[in-house]
Amino acid sequence: MTAADSSNSGRSPGNRPLTELPGVGPQVAARLKALGLECELDLLFHLPLRYEDRTRITPLNQVRPNTTVQVQGRIVHQEIRYGRSRMLLATLADDSGQVMLRLFRFFPSQLRQLKEGARVRCFGEARFGPGGFELIHPQVTSLGRDNGPPLPESLTPVYPTTQGLAQANLARLVGLVVTRLSQGSIRLPDPLPQASDAPPLDQALLTIHAPGPNEDLAALVDGHHPAVQRLATEELLAHHLALARLNQARARQRAPVLKDEKGLGSRLLASLPFKPTSAQSRVIGEILADLAGKRPMRRLLQGDVGSGKTLVAAAALVVAAAAGRQAAIIAPTEILAEQHFRTLSAWLEPLGLTLVWLAGKVKGKARRQALEALAGPADIAIGTHALFQAGVEFRDLGLIVVDEQHRFGVHQRLALTAKGQRGRLLPHQLVMTATPIPRTLAMTAYAGLDVSVIDELPPGRKPVTTVAASQSRRDQVIERLKTALADGRQAYWVCPLIEESDVLQAEAAETRSVELARSLSGFKVGLVHGRMKPADKQQVMDDFGAGRIRLLVATTVIEVGVDVPNASLMMIENAERLGLSQLHQLRGRVGRGSDQAACVLLYRPPLGEMARARLEVMRETTDGFVIAEKDLELRGPGEVLGTRQTGMLRFRIADLARDADLLDSVHGLAAKLDARAQNLIIERWLGQAEQFIDV
Ligand code: ADP
Ligand code: MG
């Protein structure tokens, strides 16, 4: 199905473009569009984040601390207090008592609104302050002489919005559409069979947008309410149906048959200083079977950090080259791509294969030569996303390997597939990730991919010992580091992002490297960050690899794939700011050699609850699967997969961790629906996004 088809058929009667609603000019329309909202149905399916109870007024003598309240009365006193900064204090009184309103920043209009004698309604969280109860920065409505606008009869939903689109305006627009739904002016076909324990679709939407005062609010918010479950079921169903279609379409696709008649693979294995683990051998077997088939391989290779995915990739690359086609391997960072280039050159050039390196920074003559080779004699291309940019042509691309897949956008992957298309033939694809995919996600997000797992590390690896230490103990940590360096060990010191900007990141790392070089005089300290010239970066990595640099200070550029077995210590600063999978990736840089490796997570107190939980998990386990499950629990699936940016898997209401138990009934429902009902559901929930599910 093309995007054009789905947007046309999605515009059924009673589903007007939002520009036809009152008060939606070009500017508001643009903001709505940024939220993915273009027609009335989009608004109906734009669901609240949370609710506020504005159905009642709390008398002032019944205000309790740490509750959200709505109060109203008369301002009896106003003053501006000058301390470290200016502050507006106003006392609100009703017949029963008083509270203080406290504003740290305010406009002249607010001074007027809260002047003595004014009648106002306020909504906000009550706290216990120095002089009794107070509301800090409440939302204020002026009342005039009467009692003000009537109180809403249902809970007030709060919607996700974007800068420049006021919550009130967005809520007003949703309200208009919800009213039209309740009056029957919007038709919303309900394709699911009526279930006894679930409300019909329109009822579920009305409950979610305008819950009555007696609705179970907690269940609505945590998602166990039947109305939420009704919508989540339909959304999961939409994904399931779309994937089933994708699989049908794939059954008709063709790919080049790749077989290693020359026995290059065995020669590769014979040349290595180690034997593949049995998990590596099994996985290589699965991949080779796919490549020898007529259908394009779509395989996800999961293997924890350090499990040896590069060798598996190499085995696949060799088969494509032996079959006379080309193969490409892309990595998310230049450091990693370059490391692959060196490893793979050492392994594959002796077999007589031609390898080509391409990254964004390859310019001029070198680039021209690389492009000529890709369009001609090259067997294997290694690089970054530069490989799938315009102007890069392959002679005959039969296999694409994507390393650390969660770092790439789906669009980029599709672009590379397109480059490999030859008539009806599509290239094979192998996607590698160190982020284990929890079972619930594997069932849905990756239902279109076959999965291979390397569930064994090369022999001799010892789990990394991990401790957490407050930043205040940094001097002690440096002392210990000194002893370790004196013992001949090598170490990483990671300064992860404190600021979003890579300039500031680089500066922070630079400052730290100078300080550390001073405290560790006698040992050579190196620095690597994303803003260095590739050649300089490479020099530093080479020096570290060869042991000339003893301590490497780095930003998170070293997160993926960097492989220096001698390094057995890692210090991570600001560890409390990093996510679990990032910490796991970073820590995976050590523990690759024979020394017992250690990792110190330096944090800046006080620790928030989430950060404390993350550090705890890191101290307790080195098992990537356990870490991924915890990550899912703490953060939710969209972020675990890094799909927030890639647009691959965006659920509006379903939550895979919460709704895993719905998946069985979803499969049952799918079997009962006819093609029309299936189309309707796919379009309603996925619309144009459907094409992006194809990974
Ligand atoms: P990852 O799965 O994280 O990409 P790598 O492919 O970088 O792991 O492998 C990690 C290290 O283990 C490399 O130094 C690699 O050469 C080594 N290695 C891979 N397979 C084996 C094996 N079967 N036996 C011993 N060492 C291996
Ligand atoms: Mg790797």
Image (spheres, rainbow, N blue to C red):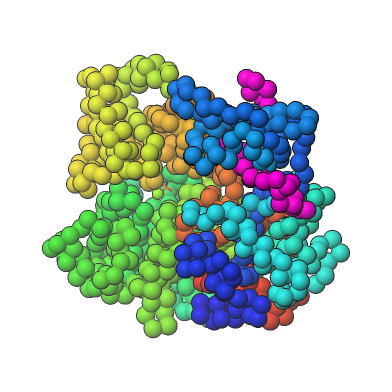
Quarter of image, res 321: bottom left
Residue 41: tell me if it is visible.
yes
Question: Foreground residue, 556 or 627?
Answer: 556
Q: Give the range drawn in magenta.
A: 128-155
Question: Foreground residue, 131 or 695?
Answer: 131
Marks counted in the figure total 0
Q: Quadrant of the N terminus?
A: bottom right
Residue 660 image point, x, y percent = 69, 55
Question: Foreground residue, 478 or 277?
Answer: 478
- Residue occupying image coordinates x 78% and y 32%: 95
Residue 373 image point, x, y percent = 21, 68
Horizontal relation, residue 476 to residue 213: left or right: left
Horizontal relation, residue 123 to residue 515: left or right: right
Horizontal relation, residue 614 to residue 414: left or right: right
Q: Does the magenta segment cover residue 154?
A: yes
Residue 356 image point, x, y percent = 24, 62
Residue lying furthest left: 365
Quarter of image, res 358: bottom left
Residue lying furthest bottom: 423
Residue 524 image point, x, y percent = 22, 27
Main SS category, magenta section: loop
Quarter of image, res 478: top left
Q: In this view, does 368 lie above or below 63?
A: below
- Residue occupying image coordinates x 25% and y 58%: 360
Q: Does the magenta segment cover residue 165?
A: no
